[in-house]
Amino acid sequence: MIHAFSLVHDDLPAMDDDDLRRGRPTLHIHAGEAMAILAGDAMLSLASATLSIVPSGVEPVGDSLHRRLVAELNAGTLGMISGQVLDTLGGFDAATPDTDRVERIHREKTGALIMAACRMGTLIGARSLPGPVADARLAAVSEYADAIGLMFQVVDDLLDVTQSAEHLGKRTGKDADAGKLTYPGVHGVEGSRVFVNALLDRATRALGSLPDGEHRDVLQELASFLAQRTK
C-alpha cells in the first residue's frame, strides 16, 4: 500500500507529472488530482491499519514485536519521503559531489522501503530464535537489503535510458529532461552496469551467513532477477 501510495503521489503534476504508469493512465489522469491525492493519503493510513490486523488462524506477534514492525515501516516510509524531497526539491550542501547525492537519493527514495520490507520479514521469521542468532540474521538481511535496494534504482535508471516507453509502460527519459541526478548521468551506462554487478556480489556475500535452505535460495533468485530485469 505504501509503495502504491508513493507511485500515485510521485506521478502528480507537482512531482514527476507522469501520465502513464504500467501501461495505463496514471490515477490523476484517470480520476483527477484531488482523488489521486486522497487515494494516496488513504493507502498510507490503511497500511498502518493493516499491520494491526491479525488474520484468522495466525498467532499474534506480540506487542513488543508489533511496535518494532510499526517503527520499521515508519522509518522506511519517512526515508522514502526524504529521498523524494532531495530528488525533487534538493537540499544538499553545495559542496556535496553528484556521486554522493545520487547515491543518497536512491538509497532513501527506493532503498528505504525495500529495507523495511526485508527487515520486517526477518523480524517476524526470527522471533523464536535466540537473541544473538536473530540479531546476526537481521544484520545479514539488512546488508542484503541495502545492496538490492540501491541496485533496484540503478537498474531503473539504466532501463530509463535503454528501453522504450512501450516496453516499460511508462514515459522514459523524464529524469534527464527534468535535470535530475541518475546513475547513468553521473557514472555512465557502462559504469552503472559494473556497479549493478558489484551490488549483486555484495548481496550474495551477505546471504552467505544465512542458513542453507529455501529462504536463502529465494533471496538469491530475487537479487539475480532484480539485477537482470528488463522492465
Image: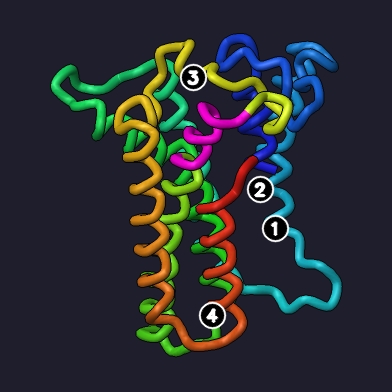
Distance CA(mark 1)–CA(mark 4): 17 Å
- Residue at 53% x, 61% y is 224
From the image, state whether disc 3 or disc 2 is nearer to you.
3
Mark 3 sits on what residue? 175
Q: Amino acid at mark 1?
A: Ser
Report the front residue among 8 and 160. Answer: 160
Q: Amino acid at mark 4?
A: Arg
Q: Amino acid at mark 2?
A: Ser
* Pointer 3 or 1: first along the chain: 1
Q: Which mark is residue 52?
A: 1
Distance CA(mark 4)–CA(mark 3): 41 Å
Q: Helix, strand, or loop for circle 4?
A: loop
Whether residues under marks 3 and 2 lie with C-beta atoms below 8 angstroms apart, the answer is no
* Pointer 1 or 4: first along the chain: 1
- Residue at 66% x, 48% y is 48
Instruction: Give coordinates of residue 175: x percent, y percent.
Output: 49, 19
Q: Which mark is residue 4?
A: none
Vertical position of residue 197 compared to residue 84: above or below: below
- Residue at 60% x, 72% y is 218
Whether residues under marks 2 and 1 lie with C-beta atoms below 8 angstroms apart, the answer is yes
Q: Give the left or right position of residue 26, taking residue 107 as reference.
A: right
Q: Main secondary structure of the magenta part?
A: helix
Q: Helix, strand, or loop for circle 2?
A: helix
Determine the image quadrant of residue 38. top right
Distance CA(mark 4)–CA(mark 2): 21 Å
The quadrant of the rendering that contains the N terminus is top right
The quadrant of the rendering that contains the C terminus is top right
* Pointer 4 or 2: first along the chain: 2
Distance CA(mark 3)–CA(mark 2): 31 Å
Residue 12 lies in the magenta-colored region: no
Mark 4 sits on what residue? 127
Neighbour tally class for label 1: few under 14, some 14-19, many 20 plus, Cα within 10 Å: some
